[in-house]
Amino acid sequence: MKITKVECLIASRFTPEAPNAGNSMFVVTHTDDGLTGIGEAYSVGPDIATKEWVGYFGDQIVGHDPTRIEYLWAMMYQGARFPPGSSGLAALSGIDQSLWDITARSYDMPVYELLGGRYRDKIRGYLDVHLGNSDGSGLDAMRETVRYAIDVSGYTAFKVNPLPDDWRDLPWLEAVDAGVKLVGALREAAGPDAEIGMDAHAAVFEPGRLLELADAHIVNTPMFMEEPLRMENRHAMGELRKKMPYALATGECLYTKFEFTELFRAEAVDIIQPEVCIVGGMTEMRKIAADAEAHDISVAPHNPMGPLATTVNLHFDAAIPNFLIQEMRPFTELEKSFVKSSPEVKDGHHDIPSGPGWGIELELDAIADRPYRSDWHRGDRLLSDGAIAYI
């Protein structure tokens, strides 16, 4: 079996109701046996650049056996000459996923069987929720979301920002106090037994202020604090972790085993959150998880993605011993239209995926109906003095 073509399909999610929704980016690898494999790449902004990277890598691996996954990963990564950045790693991640899909399909088994088989029987998830501004204007919507998530899907864990949306417009201590009250409202809505993670989005620059924030939230008994500082300074993260009153989580912005190894050496994390659509695919995810296990570190994969990437994560979660919990969010109807089926949460858990490969198929006509229009832009966030804020 040989690879005959690797293509990147970009599907626009922009709509009048969601003008900043971005794109979904899929990789399809074809073989001369008729088997195809699929994967998803992260939309990092310059999505056309990622598509070009898919073509660049695809040119290198066409004609090769798709089941030689490690060999092809090294060919692409080292073939970039310099270590690729976000667009290149997103492309490599999507291609790598497609190779795992082809290989598992060729053996008529799910991917998790190639990873060592099921380590667990179901996969617990947490739901991202939104709190709104310091005046409490978003609390009714949050309570409705939480009630629905508990009643319909049985969620027992949630994640929020520990600060209100408008915190940059407030004096620091007022912002901290407002955040504590808002997360307290979530605690009340979710119940005393629910677990609550908090995501600071790497927006607080000073370690001292972050420690103030972490200490103030002890009353809300958090599960973890995610991205408390900018991810570039592993030393500062390690020094902060020594003083954190609960678990520190990070990793969504890191690439490959090399950067995660630096994190472990700095003793800078309790829970890692690698993103399978940018970290280097399933090949790197399993290596990073094994390294983390040797350091007594749990894995809670990052996942703000759609049904395909979520399914890929579920295969990883099923097989990895030190898996902790999976990030989830509701899929839009548009995202669900891009695939033939979508994973669902019941009793706060996902079932183990079934079927060969990932066990999920793309709806190519629906993707073709949503052609690329433009790139996603995060947009500037400003401080009160007009300076560009960390986000």
Image: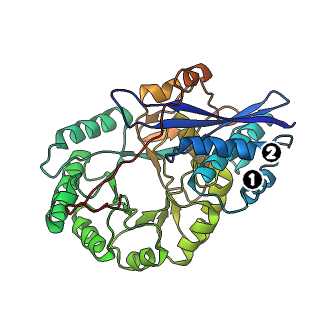
Q: Are marks 1 and 2 in contact (CB under 8 Å)?
A: yes
Q: Secondary structure at mark 2?
A: helix
Q: Which residue shows up at 75% across the image and 60% down it? A: 78
Image quadrant holding the C terminus, namely bottom left
Q: Earlier in the sequence, mark 1 or mark 2?
A: 2
User: As drawn, is 210 to the left or to the right of 122?
Assistant: left
Q: Which residue is mark 1?
A: 76
Q: Where is residue 148? Give x, y as percent.
A: 29, 34
Q: Secondary structure at mark 1?
A: helix
User: As drawn, is 248 to the left or to the right of 66?
Assistant: left
Residue reaching furthest front? 386
Q: From the viewer's side, name the closer residue of 142 and 278.
A: 278
Vertical position of residue 337 compared to residue 307: above or below: above
Q: Which residue shows up at 18% across the image and 49% down it? A: 133
Q: Which residue shows up at 39% across the image and 27% down it? A: 15
Q: Where is residue 348? Give x, y as percent.
A: 41, 41
Q: From the viewer's side, name the closer residue of 225 and 38.
A: 38
Q: Local crowd at mark 2 within 10 Å, few (<14), some, or many (≥20)?
A: many
Q: Which residue shows up at 49% across the image and 36% down it? A: 23
Q: Local crowd at mark 1 within 10 Å, few (<14), some, or many (≥20)?
A: many
The numbered disc on residue 380 is none
User: As drawn, is 253 to the left or to the right of 386?
Assistant: right
Q: Is residue 97 visible?
A: no
Disc 1 residue type (three-letter): Met
Residue 329 picture quarter: top left
Q: Which residue is mark 2?
A: 61
Q: CA distance from mark 1 to mark 2?
A: 8 Å
Q: Is residue 387 visible?
A: yes
Disc 2 residue type (three-letter): Ile
